Amino acid sequence: MNPATKRFRLLASLALKDLWHDRKVSMCIAAALVAVIAPLLLLFGLKHGVVSQLQSELLNDPRNLEIRMISSGRYDAEWLEELRNRAEVGFAIGMTRSLNTQADLVLDRRHFVDNAEIIPTAEGDPLLASLSLSQPLQGSAVVLSESAARRLNVGVDEELSLFVSRRLDGRAERGQQSVIVKGILPADVFPRPAAFVALPLLIALEDFRDGYRIDSLGVETGEQRGDRETHFSRARLYAADMDQVAKLEQWLNAQHIDTASRLAEIENVKAINHVLGLVFGVIASTALVGCLASMLGAFLANIDRKRKDLAVLRLLGFDRPAIAGYIVLQASTLTLAAYGVGLALYGLGSQIFNQALAMSTTTGSVVCRITFVHGVMALLLALLVALVVALIGMLRAFSIEPAESLREL
């Protein structure tokens, strides 16, 4: 073992034995730290738990990312492509006129849904993300909402009929197409009776109502559609994330497109996060200043009380760096012990909070919790306070001369 290692081990041993010898004083200093660390961990755990839960609820509900175009217009494929290419957009698909987004879904005479919503979808649709479909909907494949599937009494891979009506040249006509259910969307994602279909099927329904001949619907009357360009009255639109909702809505409004979104709910969560962060910051800063003052006073008083002992160490050959290491070791040891106790008290307190919150229907999902990274950051902050205290204590200790140990002999 080299001399430096032996010297460090001796220094560490002396520092720990000194703490144990003055254990009452050491416990008082550690208790002052615990009184700050444990409440701050609990406070931050509540703040993080509340905000993360609110953010999770927003993110898990894709409807919070939806921007509804209220007014109808006339948008071509080029405009839709420009919209999809914007960085703020997570998903966009064209929509036909409102009157053409309804159809009757029929299984038999006892099971049917009149005027169900027919909603276009494609790959990347946030509403269908939870279904994990093997491939995007194509042709006659549909996804039903839970309420529509319940009223029709159908399940996945079952077949039913889609009916659409029109009046052409004074005659009532009804088109029909068989569709296959490929998925059922939970009610908490989409509560109304609806069928999600590929965009070409929705366009076919609109063309049929506009008087064109659509062979897939089993009606041979009407004029040929030809190569007529398709225009959309609006779009199903979702932002890429919560921070992009406001930007995307502003871009649409700048084009004189009236919109509606849940931006108010998103801003409320951001405001709660800001307010809680400010409250936590003020309390934490005040507590840290008080802790620093308390710990500093205790350390300086302890150093003054042990001037003779420190002078003896200087007389025995311990230079200023060794004395500095001695003080830092003591401060770090007390801080680590206080942090361990504070973390244990946080664990106990968080369990009490979580059980109390779980009994409430309004806060049942809110928890008091911190992550591993938060714990490490709290430890580093506590050690930083200890280092500041140790640094000031060093300056006091450096003023002690070795000769002081001889004056009382």
Image: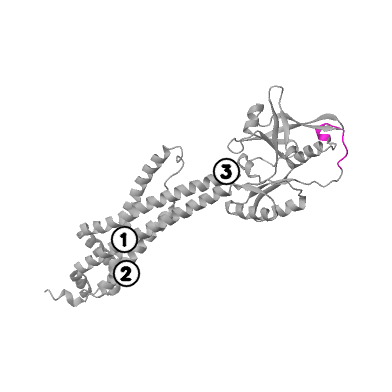
Residue under label 3: 61
Residue 134, image x and y in percent? 67, 40
Residue 225, image x and y in percent? 86, 41
| 12 w.r.t. 105: above or below | below
User: What element does badge 2 sit on?
Assistant: helix
Disc 1 versus disc 3: distance between alpha carbons? Answer: 43 Å
Residue bounds of the magenta highlight: 215-225
If you read the primary sequence from the N terminus, does the residue marked by circle 1 or circle 2 appear first?
1
Residue under label 2: 391
At 44% from the left edge and 55% from the top edge, which residue is drawn? 277
Alpha-carbon neighbours of circle 1 within 10 Å: few (<14), some, or many (≥20)?
Answer: some
Of 280 and 255, the residue lying toward us: 255
Query: Does residue 294 appear to the left or right of 196 in the view shown?
Result: left
Comparing labels 2 and 3, the label whose residue is closer to the camera:
3
If you read the primary sequence from the N terminus, does the residue marked by circle 2 or circle 3 appear first?
3
Query: Does residue 185 appear to the left or right of 10 in the view shown?
Result: right
User: What element does badge 3 sit on?
Assistant: loop
Residue under label 1: 290
Q: Is residue 216 magenta?
A: yes
